[in-house]
Amino acid sequence: MHDEIDELDAYFASKGETTEAEALKLEHMMMEKISINPARRKLLRIVGIFGKTEKQLKEESGLNDFFFKFHMDLLLKEGFLKFEDGIYRLKDLGIAMHDSVC
């Protein structure tokens, strides 16, 4: 039996590991993406050093449910925020962003 190789699998297999330079470039691109959006900057500023609950963030940001979820999902996925014990908190990357643009 002949196993066919999917083109997408072949592409990713040939790509190999991300180099340190590529990883740094991707991190900088994501930081720019976060920093140019006023809603994301506002969310980072509101979370601040003490953290906030979802209810507090929604009230203070003034974002509707869709945009709140959209921005928070991105901030969580990219490692700017973490969710612990019902509180959103800044991670190291979020602290760096908070200190530089908020």
Image (cartoon, grey):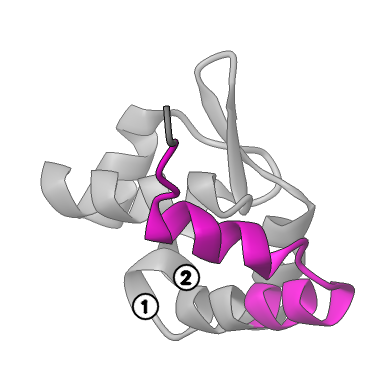
**Residue underneath mark 1:** 38
Q: Is residue 64 visible?
A: no
Numbered circle sitting on residue 41: 2
Q: Which residues are magenta?
A: 3-28
Furthest residue toward right: 20
Alpha carbon of mark 1 to alpha carbon of mark 2: how far?
5 Å
Residue 31, quarter of the rendered image: bottom right
Q: Are marks 1 and 2 in contact (CB under 8 Å)?
A: yes
Q: Is residue 24 visible?
A: yes
Seen in the picture, residue 84 relative to 72 is either above or below; the reply is above
Foreground residue among 98 and 32: 32
Q: Report x, y in % for residue 54.
A: 37, 31
Asked if residue 74 lies left or right of residue 26, the reply is left
Residue at horizontal 42%, vertical 27%?
1
Q: Main secondary structure of the magenta part?
A: helix
Seen in the picture, residue 83 relative to 80 is either above or below; the reply is above
Q: Amino acid at mark 2?
A: Arg
Asked if residue 16 lies left or right of residue 52, the reply is right
In the image, is residue 82 part of the stretch drawn in magenta? no
Q: Report x, y in % for residue 43.
A: 43, 57
Asked if residue 88 lies left or right of residue 73, the reply is right
Foreground residue among 87 and 8: 8
In the image, is residue 21 part of the stretch drawn in magenta? yes
Q: Amino acid at mark 1?
A: Pro
Asked if residue 35 lies left or right of residue 60, the reply is right
Residue at horizontal 62%, vertical 54%?
80
Residue at horizontal 31%, vertical 29%?
55
- Classify the position of the C terminus by image quarter: bottom right
Furthest residue toward front: 1
